[in-house]
Amino acid sequence: MPYSAMQLMRSILSLLLATAGGSSALAQVPACNQPTALASVLDAQGLPVAGLKPADFDIQVNGKPSKILNMTEDRSPRRIVVLLDASKGMRGENNGKWVLALQIAIDVFVKIPQETQLALLIYSNQVEKTVGFSQDRSAALALLGNLRSGVEDLDSAGRGPHFLDAILQALSLFGESQFGDTIFAITSGFDTGSKASLASVEHSLLQTPTRTFLSALISWPGPLSGIGIYREALPASVAPPPGQRALAVPGWVKSTGGSLLTVHSVLNGLSHSYEFDEDQKRNLAASLAAFYRQMLETYRFDLDLPAKPEKSIHLKVQLSRSVAPSHKDWVILYPSSVVACHSGHS
């Protein structure tokens, strides 16, 4: 029986928490006694919780309590790179996955508020197309629309995805990093041979205040019949296609302060489809809307450290004892390391 929307969100949030311990290779950052950090507090539906106060949080830096000097609800304009997987697996014939991936990318450019800057990077084993921050959204929407209608095609035949390399390419589009920069990757969930390693990509991400959000489109060989949309971690029982390796998500995604939305196509014999009924379409639209709010609505903390750390600044954010018992279904997304001093970044 399909999950309810609330059950689905609780599933992904519980799995995110369970796998968050996989982060490693924290970035080496300049010592500073007033770093700035962010956190997103999510309710059971995955929507940001507003109206919290500094006393509602317990924050530790390098295992020691940190005082919040200032806290604001940050809804300042963001910069988001939309990273679109155009590999052979995504663009394969008659599976509907490519159409859905394009639909999600178009939805981002239509639904995200206009004050947010958006860029688009389409990749397979190389960068296929790029629409930078300096270009109007209409350029990206025209490209995506033409690809969806078949008026335009990509030059390559579509090989396996070099996802990790594409993350580094997306980082380069930002130039100098800014607080709240975000990568939103629409991916098949696999990597076929990137030159970059998982550890090096995580290290590069944690050196900047850049968060990573994934929307993974995968085939789910589960016991259910029909088509379902599920928001949960990529299951370990799903074997990657020949020659591809599964990515270690969502642990490394959560270490950047991001999250994961998985869209599953349930296999029916040897065929699978991404054609959804009206309830499933509404579920996906609501899931994406919550995802966008997670990217755009955060708490911003200016922290005071008892001493200047000599190495990396490791962060832990929890609800205070006065709040946590009555909100056990709330989840906090935050980067595992603090990388920006209050005086050094916008």
Image (tube, rainbow, N blue to C red):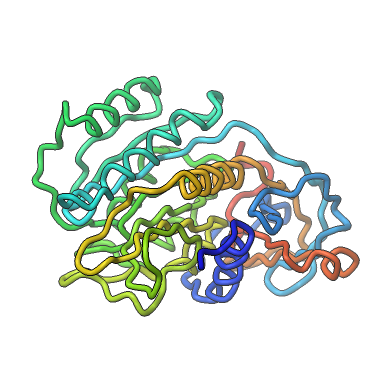
Q: Residue at x 52, y 32 (%)?
A: 112
Residue 59 pos. (x, y %): 76, 64
Task: Kindly identify the residue that appears in the image at 16 percent across and 71 percent down.
Answer: 243
User: Is residue 245 rendered to the left or right of residue 284?
Assistant: left
Residue at image location 39% in from the left, 46% down from the top: 171
Q: Is residue 285 shown left or right of residue 43? A: left
Which quadrant of the structure image shows residue 200? bottom left
Q: Position of residue 276 (x, y in %)?
A: 39, 48
314 vs 266, left or right, is right
Q: Nearer the viewer, residue 296 or 262?
A: 262
Is 289 situated left or right of 87 in this image? right
Q: Is residue 4 above or below residue 184?
A: below
What is the count of numbered marks? 0
- Where's residue 211, x and y in %? 51, 51
Q: Is residue 107 above or below residue 225?
A: above
Position of the C terminus, as image quadrant, is: top right
Question: 174 and 230: which one is in front?
Answer: 230
Residue nearest the observer in this picture, 147 or 160: 147
Above or below, 133 against 44 in this view is above
Quadrant location of residue 305?
Answer: bottom right
Residue 108: percent from left, percent from top: 45, 36
- Please, which residue is most extreme toward the bottom here? 237
Task: Say above or below: 105 vs 136.
Answer: below
Tell me which residue sits at (20%, 56%) in the image.
89
Give 184 or 3, whichever is nearer the viewer. Answer: 3
